[in-house]
Image (cartoon, rainbow, N blue to C red):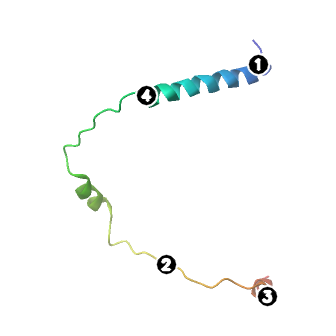
Amino acid sequence: MNLRKNLEAVFIVAAVVTNFASYAVASAQTPDIVIRSAPAAVAVNNVVDRNVPVVVVKAQRLSAAEKAALN
């Protein structure tokens, strides 16, 4: 089988299989997840580091004349 010759058919078959697989996975029941270590609020607070400096840059846009002067 010449793959280059039949690449369009291979693509269509792969798209159809993927489409049916997505419907099969979407209709499956979601698993029950049990977290026994810590509540979500405590886990999020441990991840966020409040000592990290945040830089906010505020500036006006350059006019066309100022841009031309830079070049």
Q: Secondary structure at mark 4?
A: loop
Which residue type does callout 3 highlight?
Ala
Q: CA distance from mark 3 to mark 4?
A: 60 Å
The residue positioned 45% from the left and 31% from the top of the image is 26
- Of tags 3 and 4, the one toward the viewer is 4
Q: Is residue 44 above or below residue 60?
A: above
Tell me if mark 1 has few (under 14), some (14-19) or many (20+) residues whose alpha carbon lies within 10 angstroms of its own.
few
Q: Quadrant of residue 18?
A: top right
The residue at which mark 2 appears reads as 56
Work out how far the residue at label 1 is from the one at label 3, CA to CA, in angstroms: 57 Å
Residue 17 horizontal/vertical position (percent): 58, 22
Does label 1 or label 4 sit earlier along the sequence? Answer: 1
Whether pointer 2 and pointer 3 mark residues with C-beta atoms closer than 8 Å, the reply is no
Residue linked to disc 1:
6
Q: Nearer the viewer, residue 21 or 27?
A: 27
Taking the image as shown, residue 19 lies to the left or right of residue 29, namely right
- The alpha-carbon separation of the residues under discs 1 and 4 comes to 32 Å
Question: Residue 44 lies in what quarter of the image?
Answer: bottom left
The residue lying at 55 percent from left, 82 percent from top is: 58
| Residue located beneath label 4 in the image | 27
2 or 4: mark nearer the eye: 4
What amino acid is at disc 2?
Val
Spatial distance from mark 2 to mark 3, Cα to Cα?
26 Å
**Circle 2 residues within 10 Å: few <14, some 14–19, many ≥20:** few
Identified at 27% across, 60% down, the residue is 46
- Report the disc number at residue 65: 3
Whichever of labels 2 and 4 marks the residue nearer the N terminus, that label is 4
The reply to whether callout 2 and callout 1 are in contact (CB within 8 Å) is: no
Marked residue nearer the N-terminal end (3 or 4): 4
Q: Earlier in the sequence, mark 2 or mark 3?
A: 2
Q: Residue at x 20, y 50 (%)?
A: 38
Where is residue 22 shown, x and y percent of the image?
A: 51, 29
